[in-house]
Image: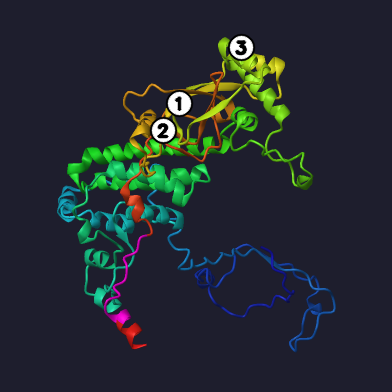
Amino acid sequence: MALPTRDKVPEESTNDQPRDEVDALGDSQVASTDITVQTPQNPGQAVDEQGSKEEEDPKEETADVAITKKKKKRSKKSRGKKKGTGFEEYAVDGPITPAEYEANRGRYDSRLETAIQRFQAKRNMNSDRRNVFIKYMSYGGVDVGPKMFEGNDVRDLMDKDAEDILTATAQASVPENRVGWDVDFEMVAKGFLSSVLPKYIGLETEELVEMATGTIRNFLNYVLLHDVCPEYHDNILAARAVCDAAKVELWKAQQAGCWAPGDFNVACSTLFGGSFHGLYTEDQEWSKGFGAEGMPDSIARKVVKFAIAGAGSYEQAVRFRDLANTNELKVTCVNEHGFEVVAVTLPDADVRDFYKQHAPDLQPVGKLRAKPWRDPGLPQEDLPPSAQQALEVYSPSGNTVEYEFFVEESMLKFCFVGMKVDTSVWELNCGLDYFDNAMATYCSFYTVLLNESMIGWKEPRDLREDDLAKGSSG
């Protein structure tokens, strides 16, 4: 770095200081060892002893100075941001010594509560991950939050060791009235991931799905590593397998629900009956300028005809043609609850070629085979004995009723065996089935537990003493 300086007349040194002493000067007294000085030819033009100005323009004296940047101190808020969270893809807890293993067995032997507290202390969770973990703990019967009447003073914690401080400041506890509950890690994982997570937290992106399932899987790995409850080892492994399946099925079910019910089923609902019947608004005067909603009848007829001709059987095509020509097509709602997918068949090469040649503006359709399904979370229907036989189609034993739907590949590629769809099923008298607007799509392990009814529950206040006394006195 070059620094400009004024020229000065090199005065004859009268100091007899030895050269060795000059060389002994430290770096702190010398800015740089590479200095170039340009002096004027006539020394008389330099500044006199009284400090008069120079008559000529000064020359430049340059020096290379090495400047070191001052390190910025990190604020307290930024400290620890680069530290691992413990939820990375390949993050694992380090090996433990035999002494630590025996200590953990004694520590976790009595309750799972200590394992939850130590897991929270060992992991760095952001707000989204903490929200998922707290909901998961609450769903599993664990109270998460500040303990009532157990405030801690800083002076009280000074005399405690790390273990006692962790226990005193913990915000996770298992109430004594829940000690008798059944312990089932697998069922809690199924119920939370399939029912609670999509409904109360939301899965807008694939990253959110991976974060939610990874958080629960990380906790289960922690419980396995530290041998918290060895008697439930197999049950915890099954719960971890549920997390792996949920990572794939949750996002697929979310995508399938966005594409459902597909153009063919919308066309059938528009023409024959369903939630899309009469929904088309472009021909209405009041809808001009707002955009069209629904599907016009002309497009709906084209979609249905090409789907039957391209993917339907010969008998279905002939019967549909005959009934349509005589205006005798009729439709019946055969199921108001939904179906479960049992087989997925993508469009083959012949169907693709047919659409490419005759209807390039339409999507090729494949087939979706399903069986009746009813949401187990719904209350039982109160029916007279004469109508009980209608419920046999929903019984899992000895049921041979199956549906076959025509579905576009845009939705079909996200469907999987075991997927549940909450919708109504309709049947044409020509042998064709179609389903209406899909209200929800669920994983293959969809489970509803009574724990879900406790979400948001608060213990009622006791009004028998203070409040009643205040009310009567006022």
The magenta segment is 457-468
Between circles 1 and 3, the one closer to the viewer is 3
Horizontal and vertical percent position of residue 96:
23, 48
Q: Is residue 186 inside the magenta stretch?
A: no
Query: Mark 3 highlights which residue?
Result: 318
> Which numbered disc, 1 or 3, marks the residue that appears first in the sequence?
3
Q: How dense is the environment of label 3, judged by Cα within 10 Å: few (below 14), some, or many (20 and up)?
A: some
Label 2 amino acid? Trp
Q: How dense is the environment of label 1, judged by Cα within 10 Å: few (below 14), some, or many (20 and up)?
A: many
Residue contact between numbered discs 1 and 2, judged by CB atoms under 8 Å: yes
Secondary structure of the residue carrying tag 2 is: loop
Query: Mark 1 highlights which residue?
Result: 370
Numbered circle sitting on residue 21: none
Q: Quadrant of the N terminus?
A: bottom right
In this orientation, does residue 413 appear? no
Cα distance between the residues tagged 1 and 2 = 9 Å
Secondary structure of the residue carrying tag 1 is: strand
Horizontal and vertical percent position of residue 141:
29, 54
> Which numbered disc, 2 or 3, marks the residue that appears first in the sequence?
3
Residue at (62, 62) in percent of width and height:
34
| Main secondary structure along the magenta-highlighted residues | loop
Q: Quadrant of the C terminus?
A: bottom left
Residue contact between numbered discs 2 and 3, judged by CB atoms under 8 Å: no
Quadrant of res 62: bottom right
Query: Mark 2 highlights which residue?
Result: 373
Q: How dense is the environment of label 2, judged by Cα within 10 Å: few (below 14), some, or many (20 and up)?
A: many
